[in-house]
Image (tube, grey):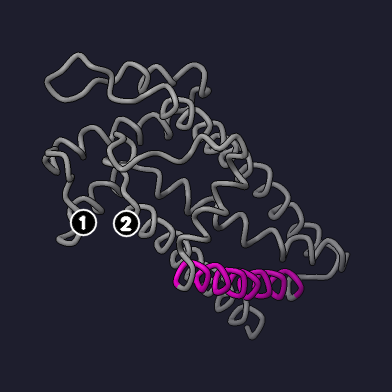
Amino acid sequence: MNLLRWVVILLIPFLLAAVVTTLVIQPWYPKWEYGKANFPADAFGWTQAERLDLALVSVDFLRSWGSADDTIYMLAEQTFPDSADLLFTPNEVDHMHDVKVRTNLIRVAIGVLGVIVVGGLWMIGRGQGGAAVWRTIQQGGVATGVILVVFGAMIGLAWQWFFTTFHEVLFPAGNWSFPYSSSLIRLFPNKFWLDVGIVIVASTLLLGLLLAVIGWLMRRT
């Protein structure tokens, strides 16, 4: 039972991070990001409204429930504003196909981790009582805080290293680096991803702290 409790504790941070990530891959996020006064303008002439319209297609692609193979046409057939020329190169399309595969896996992970965490808490409650459940939730929140502080430090102190390492691990084929003139970089510049990292880390950290506080309070009742 103690082993199960530690499994649940260690999975809670990953479950929270996966949930937050799916909540960020929604239309509200690029709308909020593009609306910032300090969001960089496009160096090649697109207006912010044009960029946002183009970027939202990529968001719709990633949040769709179809497979990467079935939905990649959304980007492969996307064109420049007021032009019949394709917006993305084959390499950019291939990269977004890989991103879609991984975002779909995040949804699967939410289901799997959710079942394990909820089922584990239920078994802990049956075996050790309600106090053990709340202690596990509290410790899962604390574990989330510790892990996210480390990630936050890496983002704050070594963003470029973190960004590069993250992509090298997830995309070993190397199809993730593009020139500044590419459509993907024009739509999603470095600041966009820096802010995404900050939002995901901060939101997951807050959820972890909330769980820790709830668990602590419930143990005292």
Report the residue at 39% width, 29% height from top.
61
Q: How many marks?
A: 2
184 magenta-colored: no
The stretch in magenta equals: 132-156
**Residue 22, image x and y in percent?**
47, 46
Residue topped by disc 2: 191
Image quarter of residue 55: top left
Label 2 sits on what residue type?
Answer: Lys
Nearest the viewer among 87 and 131 is 87
**Residue 154, image x and y in percent?**
52, 69
Residue 39, numbered label:
1
Report the residue at 20% width, 34% height from top.
53
- Cα–Cα gap, marks 2 and 1: 7 Å
Report the residue at 44% width, 20% height from top.
71
Q: Residues within 10 Å of mark 2 (few under 14, many from 20)?
A: few
**Residue 31, image x and y in percent?**
23, 47
Q: Say which element carries label 1.
A: loop
* Among the two numbered marks 2 and 1 on one chain, the one whose residue lies closer to the N terminus: 1
Nearest the viewer among 27 and 155 is 155
Q: Residue furthest bottom?
A: 220
Residue 6, numbered label:
none
Q: Are marks 2 and 1 in contact (CB under 8 Å)?
A: yes
Q: Is residue 6 left or right of residue 159?
A: right
